[in-house]
Amino acid sequence: MTPADAGNLYVIACGSPASRQVGRLVTLAQQRDWSVCVVVTPDGRKFVDAPGLAAQTGHPVRTDYKNPGDPDVLPPPDAMIVAPATANTINKWAAGITDTLALGLVVEAQGKGLPIVTLPFTNTALAGHPAFQESVARLRGWGIPVLLGDDVLPLQPPGAGEQLIDRIPWRLTLDVLDDEMAAGTTGE
């Protein structure tokens, strides 16, 4: 892929108020010549402007698996960013659960060896649960960059995360993805 054609980037957004800002990530990715497709979890659908994102990307926003025999409406992904990722999505992903289209795509992409970066957006209580901590460690152990920590975005107590939505480091997800893509091409 050349800088003029970064490929197809799937942005996977979860059920978080931070998903209201996912259009910012789309804009930044498009500035880096990615063709962007947005897929949201069923709860994520509540937070996004699906018609606005479809107009912005030129692709429908997908939430559900297609019916058997229906054609794919999105081009195949070359990379994925899962952001904002909820504790629920992180835990299910680490367990290999594919009960939503978003999770099915992420688990499959990982199995195919596609570059994936994730930016969890959760609170101190959920992040403090042992299952979440183990899931993050598992994903990192598999080579998935999980952008989590006070150096990325400080965790807040339950109900206080809204104050951080405008500080989400969308650009960082793309910077890390660029690093992952460069590492992948160097190893070929």
Image (cartoon, rainbow, N blue to C red):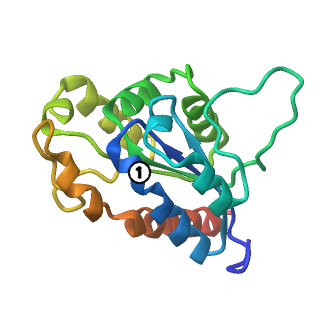
Would residue 36 be found to the left or right of residue 25 on screen? Answer: right
**Residue corresponding to mark 1:** 20
Q: Left of 184 or right of it: where is 68?
A: right
Find the residue positioned furthest to the left: 157
In the depicted structure, whether residue 158 falls above or below residue 74: above
Please say if 70 is above or below 184: above
Is residue 77 shown to the viewer in this render?
yes
Identify the residue shown where x is 14% and y is 36%.
Answer: 158
> Label 1 is placed on what type of residue?
Arg
Q: How many marks?
A: 1
**Is residue 6 left or right of 14 when viewed as pictured?**
right
Which residue is more in the foreground, 152 or 38? 38
Dot 1 surroundings within 10 Å: few (below 14), some, or many (20 or more)? some
Looking at the image, which residue is at 13% across and 31% down?
125
Residue drawn at x 38%, y 67% is: 172
Q: Position of residue 155 (x, y in %)?
A: 16, 48
Q: Quadrant of the C terminus?
A: bottom right
Q: Position of residue 151 (x, y in %)?
A: 19, 62
- Disc 1 element: helix
Question: Percent position (x, y) of residue 90?
Answer: 38, 33
Is residue 119 something one can see in this rendering?
no
Which quarter of the rendered picture does the N terminus lie within?
bottom right
Q: Quadrant of residue 157?
A: top left
Q: Is residue 59 above or below residue 187?
A: above
Task: Please state the horizontal and vertical placement of residue 34, each as a whole percent of the image.
Answer: 65, 67
